[in-house]
Amino acid sequence: QVQVVESGGGLVQPGGSLRLSCAASGSTFTINAVGWYRQTPGNQRDFIAHTASGGSTWYEDSVKGRFTISSDNAKNTVYLQMNSLKPEDTAVYYCNVEVRANTWSGKFWGQGTQVTVSS
């Protein structure tokens, strides 16, 4: 199957930047799309950004203009560059990777990475 690992989280001051990585590995597959989500304690997981294999991207209004998705297809890795971070961006960030292979397809979550924006 597919293993998904997020990394790059940490503690950053307001106005700072972080780059999260979402790396997929395992069986032979093609990534169709990747979604980024974030979740704070007691709340639902919110959908904040998305990229599809054709290169299209979508951003939720609260991150538009500050967050940017990019991909390294050779590494099966998608990045989320987060600039001008605000305290309200504090959350656990997850990626969901949609893949397809010759005989199967599926969606896989990573374990999440904590982002804390605080002075």
Image (cartoon, rainbow, N blue to C red):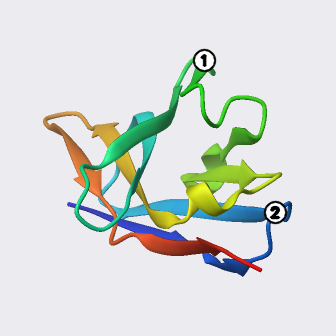
Query: For the residues carrying marks 2 and 1, which lies nearer the camera in this image?
Result: 2
How far across and down, in percent of the image, does residue 51 sit?
Answer: 54, 30
Q: Is residue 34 left or right of residue 83?
A: left
Q: Is residue 77 left or right of residue 68?
A: left
Q: Between 83 and 68, which is closer to the camera in this rendering?
A: 83
How far across and down, in percent of the image, does residue 88 sit?
Answer: 58, 56
Q: Which residue is mark 1?
A: 56
Residue in the image at 74% along x and 52% along y: 81
From the image, which quarter does the N terminus lie in? Answer: bottom left
Q: Between disc 2 and disc 1, whose residue precedes?
A: 2
At mark 2, the secondary structure is loop
Asked if 100 appears above or below 54 in the picture, the reply is below
Residue in the image at 32% along x and 39% along y: 99
Residue 27, labelled with which disc?
Answer: none
Q: Between 100 and 68, which is closer to the camera in this rendering?
A: 68
Under mark 1, the amino acid is Ser
Q: Which residue is mark 2?
A: 17
Residue in the image at 32% along x and 38% along y: 98
How far across and down, in percent of the image, does residue 39 sit?
Answer: 36, 58
From the image, which quarter does the C terminus lie in? Answer: bottom right
